[in-house]
Amino acid sequence: MTITTYLSSNGNLTSESDYKIVLESYFNPKTNLTDNTLWKRIGTRIRTSQVRMCHSMIPKGFLEQETLDDAFVILILSMKTPTRTHPKKHTMIGFAVLDYDSDYPKEIYLNALCGNTDVRNKVEQKVSAGKILMTQIEWMARQLGFTILKLSALGYVINYYRRIGFRHIEHCKTGKKGIARKSSKRNKSGDIIQDESVKEYDKTILKNAEIFYKNRFASDDELEEVYLIEVAKSSNFLGTKKEKMQYMMARLNELFSARDILFRIEDNKIIALNRKGEIDKRLMKLLKLNDTGTANFIDNLRREGYAVECDETHKGKRDGVEKDSDRELIMTCDSDGYAMRKCLNKFPLPPSSTMPGEKKYNHRVVKKMVGGKKTRKSVPWKGWSKQSPNSRQRKTMKKRCGKKCFLGPNVSFPVCKKNTCKISDKGLWAAYIRAKEWGKPKRSYKGRSRPRHKKSVYTRIIRKSKKALQKRGYKVGTSTRKRNKRK
């Protein structure tokens, strides 16, 4: 038995006839909802696709059949990609593996997650496979009665999971190793105007996490490089400025010995050379960074026991660097990530859609939603609604400034800022866009809205505003896509 959820391209729940994305939930055969043959076939499908889809970022051990046989449920996210020969073709764009331990009845563990929409076939809009999976996983966890969603996050994605509500805690009770909640801000009518924030009770972790939150890393290797540089910078050495620099250079060469990087001192500064003897510009940028808080935060997590690979002997280790089997220096207990939990009972229900549209939700609500659209795309006419004159001001403007402030009949399509006679670029852009939209064929209009003027009026406004904008140096109505020249 397979539980199938049909979704639109932006994550909204939809019907079987209109879907663009489908989520299939396969439960472990022990639950008698899936047979063994199907379960093994799903495991093979995941292992063969993760190289291309996840770029082999997930360790092989996480997806071996023995590991998957202990999994609780596997989620497969597929996108409809019909072709001429295969009109019902689907392409897998993501998967997730969830585990359950009976010793922790209220906790479900996200063992592996991967999402990638790098396929040839286009969809109506950009699809965020990771966000859709996380939203649907949270819905499933709540429906199954779980109150905690747990995962192990690699260092470079910790900030992403913190942004969607995960924290470094051991339980969801207020107190030591737990959480603390700030009181909600309410308006005079008693309505909540700001969601309650869930934070760590441990002030040291919270402080280091807020400093670390400002960083963004492209990979785990980049985070490790920043970490090693900060370890070298934090090494205490008594001596002159020159002696301290030489000691830091020696420490960097020791830490980066496995990466074929050589550090030297030239013109009273340390430079990084790659194996070709050329200056490594990427590492030079990392060397110039001020204290990012990476080393303090990672060491803090390890000492508090959140490093999954760590045992009790490494908790109190002061230096977070150790030698591996090849006698090369690496970060201590970093390979399996750091434990994070999200208290589902402390957060409101997520939206049924990953990117809810403004037709269904108010834009203020959308910003607060998990996975909601954070910011509006920047456009040249942004802010014109606050600068444009109202109906009463338009009459005064026409008497004072004349017809130059209006491109349409009477006082329609104003282009001057309110209380001035100065033509605004934003006003010209707004007039151009509005006229272009209202000048479309009548059959394209939905609802009760209808154009007030003839099409020729909108065409004239488009021509005037376009000409004015082009004189001001703007490119209007031109395509930037390069076209193939005809032979």
Image (cartoon, rainbow, N blue to C red):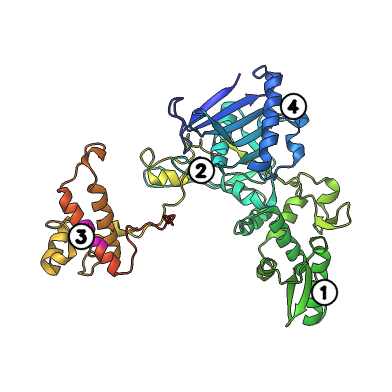
Q: Amino acid at mark 4?
A: Asp
Rendered view: 207 above or below 358: below
Callout 4: few (<14), some (14-19), or many (20+) C-alpha neighbours within 10 Å? some
The residue segment tinted magenta is 461-466
In percent of width and height, residue 444 lies at 26, 39
First in residue order: circle 4 vs circle 1: 4
Q: Secondary structure at mark 3?
A: loop
Disc assigned to residue 414: 3
In percent of width and height, residue 455 lies at 17, 48
Q: Secondary structure at mark 4?
A: loop
Callout 1: few (<14), some (14-19), or many (20+) C-alpha neighbours within 10 Å? some
Q: CA distance from mark 2 to mark 1?
A: 47 Å
Q: Nearer the viewer, residue 130 or 121?
A: 121
Residue 51, by quadrant, is top right
Q: Which residue is mark 4?
A: 69
Q: Which residue is mark 2?
A: 371
Rendered view: 34 above or below 104: above
Q: Amino acid at mark 1?
A: Tyr
- Measuring 16% from the left and 66% from the top, which residue is drawn there? 404
Q: Which residue is mark 1?
A: 247
